[in-house]
Amino acid sequence: MKNLWFLILLFVLTGCPKSEPVAMDVPKDEKAASGITFEGESLKLAGIGIEMATESESGERLTVTGTLEADPAATAIVTSRVEGKIIRLTPNVGDTVRAGAVVAVIESEKLHEAQLNHTLTVKRLEAARADLARRRKLAGLGAYSHPGVEESRKAETEASAALEKARSEVRATESALIEARSRLASQDAAVEQSRTAEALTVSQLELVQKQVARSERLLAEQLVSRQEHEGVLGQHKEASARLEHTQAETRGALAKWREALAAIETVRTRQESAEKTVATARKQLGLARQALQRGEAIFKGGYLTSREVAEAEATVEQARVSAEGALDDVQLLGGQPGDNHSIPIAVPFAGRVLERKATLGQTVTAGEPILTLVNPRTLFAQLAVFPSDLPYTRPGQGVQLSIAGRKVAGIVDRLGESADEKTRVVKVRVRVDNVSGRLRPGQPVTATIGEATKRLVVVPAGAIQTQGGKKVVFVPTERPGEFAPREIEVGTTQNGKTEVRTGLKPGEKFVAKNAFLVKSQAMKSELSEE
């Protein structure tokens, strides 16, 4: 250490080297920077060592980070079909429920109205049947004398208009469903992007934390200045702020995604009701046309008594269709004839309650989420992998996961199609069997993927310097004693060696020893120019 400071002092007393522009065919980032020149004996006194970048094989496993997520195919949002008040809500977050279990009961005014309408249509059907029996008896006595063709034509026109109105409602719900699905797809993409950004921010924060610890050690040994150490602390503060921001964006994107999913359920309910209305209107139109045809035939043939009976038969049939439609309305809302106006809400499969979005006594709208249910048996770990590491990752490959101190085995399920524009990582999905049921969605994951043997460019950790907030190495130019900064992208550091992902190729020369003196000279040149 004493020898090192002696060299620095001698280097400063020798003279202030000049800083000149680099005039050679170098990469774009080097052209933008000024060359750092050491004149005379200053280069020898500085003890700058130059080495050639070489490749080495790494048999270490590929280690990446990510987040544990629920299986989308095994996740359900439990909603109410209609607006109503929650009068019973049993499970809490974390509770396990069996398939088909009733988890909530909704008191619905709309179901009450549907029950009353069904009762009324059944009574009308009974009255129509009684009238038919009476007319048949009167027809046998010759009591009828005038046809009602005009009334049949009016009924046919009204039925035709009702059918067209119902068809318009179906078309409107189809358009609304397409729009809702598009909105869900957009929100799904937003959730994926937010989760990827959050995973990368976690990785960046962990890296900055390591840099803070290293800077503190170097500061204690007086190898870095207080200003450089405060710069590292500033990076840590910025990374923490970015993490809070990305987490907030993820929560916001998930909320919008759930709203879009609930909107789809609402539109589907409208569509089912509209399709039922179309079917009922079509039947009623057919009956009206048959009645008109019979009335016209009876009028032309003089079969007066048959006409009156046919009208009664048509009335009975229309009443029967209306009663069936009213029954469908009751069942579509989740009720049964004769029951009260309470709707039981059952879960589609066995699982664990992930979220509880409503409370007892709350009034919910149609499609509003009440519970989020997830089958915890299978989970997915979404891992962030750099494109350069993808050749060492394949579907079906074994993965060792570390989750909350537990070691869990997983299998690569799918590789992402492309890298994220902002984070420059590819999402790799790993299937995890949650046999114990102790794992939870949202937990951070550290994964080790296979035996990722690969060729790496590694340099001494001391050769890498930070300049202008970027990682650089210094490479010699064509001019003797002159060096230029080269921006690089670094990987992991082990045993004093740091992986260089991009920016330095095998066979290129770089400053391997006392690179911090080159950086110091560059800073001194900048200060002298100012």
Image: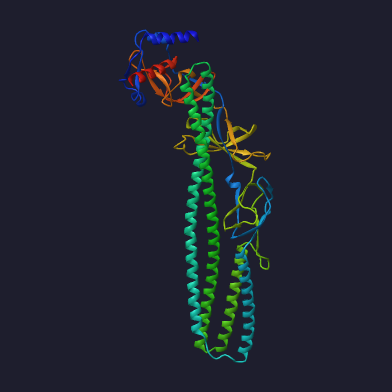
Note whether residue 496 is visible: no
Tally of numbered tags: 0
Q: Where's residue 152, x and y in %?
A: 51, 81
Colour logic: rainbow
- Describe residue 339's horizontal placement relative to residue 394 as left or right: right
Residue at image position (67%, 51%) is 99
Q: Nearer the viewer, residue 157 or 218?
A: 218
Query: Residue at 63% of width from left, 80% of height from top?
Result: 127
Looking at the image, the residue that sits furthest to the left is: 23
Position of 170 relative to 226 (above/below): below
- In the rendered image, the vertical position of residue 312 relative to residue 488, given as above or below: below
Q: Position of residue 192 (x, y in %)?
A: 51, 42
Residue 208 left/right relative to 99: left
When asked about the image quadrant of residue 121, the answer is: bottom right
Which residue occupies 62% across, 59% down?
Answer: 85
Q: Nearer the viewer, residue 89 or 226?
A: 226
Residue 74 visible in the picture? yes
Residue 60 higher or lower than 199, as above or below = above
Q: Is residue 15 above or below residue 206?
A: above
Residue 27, horizontal then vertical, whole percent:
35, 25
Question: Residue at the spot x=49%, y=8% of the render?
Answer: 2
Residue 459 in percent (x, y) is at: 47, 19
Q: Quadrant of the C terminus?
A: top left
